Amino acid sequence: MRILFSNLGYATGISGSLYHHVTKAFRHVYQSPAAQKAVLAQFRQIIDRETPDLCCLVELDQGSVHSGGFNQVQALMCQDYTVYDIEGKYGPDSHLTRLPFHHGKSNAFIAKQPFAFDYLYFRDGSKRLVHRIVLREGLTLFFTHFSLQRPVREKQFQQMREWIDAAGGEVMILADFNTFNGLEELAPLLDGGDLMLLNATDTTTFSFHRWRHLLDLCVCSTSLEGRLAMQVIPQPFSDHAALLVEEVDFDHEKHEKH
């Protein structure tokens, strides 16, 4: 199985360069459907090249004032990806969902086949949605977008730990963790010894001008070590790189013979 995770930044097409942030700043207020389609076409090229079974997407717009009412997930659908879900990231009881520039801001997934899934919601923060997807029996995927505020992130990491303990079996977390203060922030998740960081710590995933950070992460059960491979894929239309996680077939008998 191949899983692609991407922060699309609402398809503004703004990379991490200072030039883009200055000359395209107006796209944070309004962007034309044509401009969005151009960005999503670039992302579609990554999908076509990598052929993931499941694409997990944060910062996607299903029709806000900001996007001119354009539903971005529909632009990604095709005959190979007929299964999808898109849901507001703030939670059904949040007042933000009723504001013009926030209504429609979502997380989503598209897939080649159906998966059992549901929604979880953080107790703290404004971005509260977590998708929980059963990849197969005994393997659960969580994907989300953690808070920009460190005190809120700490509480969200602790709640994620509770969900992992309750899930049982093996787990994966794919998310924009926003760990601007360093990977020590992951202690609530990693200190138990049953979870590990799949990323190479010297490969950053976020850029802004001269700053580079490791924010987009895959945390998984330690029992998956050696069975998962990950690539960091540049996205010139976003300040975030994408992550491609692949289950690797591993023949233990063949390995022992050699």
Image (spheres, grey):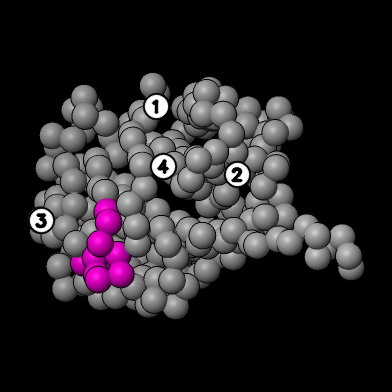
Q: What are the residue bounds of the magenta stretch?
A: 75-84
Q: Which residue lies under the disc numbered 4?
A: 133
The residue sitting at 60% across, 44% down in the picture is 219
Which amino acid, mark 2? Val
Relative to 59, does residue 158 appear above or below in the rendering? above
- Mark nearer the N terminus (3 vs 2): 3
Which amino acid, mark 4? Ile
Q: Is mark 2 on a helix, strand or loop?
A: strand
Q: Which residue lies under the disc numbered 1?
A: 122
For marks 3 and 4, give the CA distance.
28 Å
Q: Nearer the viewer, mark 3 or mark 2?
A: 2
Q: Which of 92 and 85 is in front in this view?
A: 85
The residue sitting at 36% across, 47% down in the picture is 115
Disc 3 crowd, CA 10 A, few/some/many (<14, 14-19, 20+) = some
Q: Residue 219, labelled with which disc?
A: 2
For marks 4 and 1, give the CA distance.
16 Å
Q: Residue 145: where, in percent of width, then height?
A: 42, 42
Q: Which residue lies under the disc numbered 3?
A: 69
Quarter of the image where one finds residue 77? bottom left
- Mark nearer the N terminus (4 vs 1): 1
Relative to 79, does residue 61 appear above or below in the rendering? above
Disc 4 crowd, CA 10 A, few/some/many (<14, 14-19, 20+) = some
Q: Residue 216: where, in percent of width, then height?
A: 53, 52
Q: Is mark 3 on a helix, strand or loop?
A: loop
- Mark nearer the N terminus (1 vs 2): 1
Q: Nearer the viewer, mark 1 or mark 2?
A: 2
- Mark nearer the N terminus (2 vs 4): 4
Quarter of the image where one finds residue 74? bottom left
Main SS of the magenta part reads: loop
User: Horizontally, is 15 left or right of 85 in the view?
Assistant: right
